[in-house]
Amino acid sequence: MKYWRLRLVAGAWLAASSGLGFGAAPTAADIARICANAEGPAHCGRLIEEAQLKALPNLARREGDTLVVSLFPTGQRSFADTASAASEKSYALFDYWSPINAVVLLIHVDDDASFAILQRANGQVTAVPAEPVLAPDRQRLVVADFCARCTNELSVWRVSRDGIRKELGWKPQPAWRDASAKWKDAETLVVEYTPADGGESRTLERKLTAGDWRRP
């Protein structure tokens, strides 16, 4: 259950939280509170969405098994949950990036989670393997996807009006068991990671100008 592994760590289930709605990306404390009685990852996603819909009125609505997101200036984009004997797929509203007018969706396929970014101006959807974090200059985003069944890659994506494209990728050696990334500035990442051998968590800074990034 990748999504819960990323967000509900280090005793986050016991974290305190503030009010019901949040409107920005939910913190571990938000998720701990909202999903305390969730029946599983997909149900947790739906509970997060319920809080976001209240905090972000007129952005999206739920029609049964379909999430309908408004585009700008006009139009809408629908995301329908599906179920079969072999698999179930569900969508949930996770976050809204006002600076670039984009919606972040949480997607569950059975117990595996991923994310997608919907640009409301053009209706384009870009899938990313883990939670994206937008850079302070709004030109890039970073994704840290590390677990036993993950891509085990730190990736940087370029944001433009025409779409979102993967720009850089890096796989550390030796591998990591878990990691999260944030932006120190527009050209520097701060990554907290746990080595695959089970050692203590460590932190490193990584420049986008480093020579060992791989380009798609």
Image (cartoon, grey):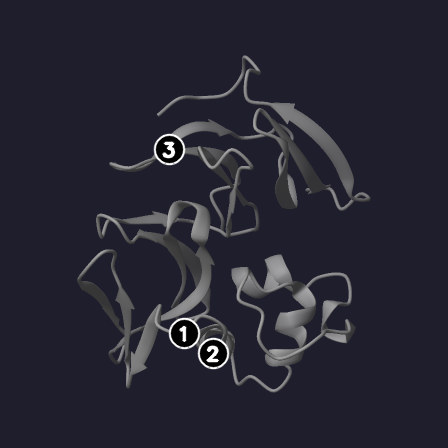
Identify the residue at horizontal 32%, vertical 77% (top origin): 61
Circles 1, 3 touching at the beta carbon (< 8 Å): no
Identify the residue at horizontal 47%, vertical 43% (top origin): 151
Label 1 vs 3, first from the N-terminus: 1
Kindly state the secondary structure of the residue where label 3 is placed. Answer: strand
Kindly state the secondary structure of the residue where label 2 is placed. Answer: helix
Q: Is residue 108 above or below residue 194?
A: below
Horizontal arrangement in the rendering, residue 197 relative to residue 129 (left or right): right
Horizontal arrangement in the rendering, residue 25 relative to residue 59 (left or right): right
Spatial CA span between label 1 and label 2: 6 Å
Which of these two is toward me, 3 or 68?
68
* Location of residue 71 in the rendering, given as x and y in whole percent from the top left corner: 25, 59
The residue where tag 2 is placed is 54
Kindly state the secondary structure of the residue where label 1 is placed. Answer: loop
Asked if one can make out residue 33 in the rendered structure from this viewpoint, the answer is: yes
Which of these two is toward me, 68 or 179?
68
Horizontal arrangement in the rendering, residue 83 relative to residue 186 (left or right): left
What type is the residue that disc 3 sits on? Lys
The residue where tag 1 is placed is 57
Point out the frontmost of discs 1 and 3: 1
* Location of residue 117 in the rendering, given as x and y in whole percent from the top left corner: 36, 52
The tag on residue 181 is: none
Q: Is residue 197 above or below residue 149?
A: above
Circles 1, 2 touching at the beta carbon (< 8 Å): yes
What type is the residue that disc 1 sits on? Pro
The residue where tag 3 is placed is 166
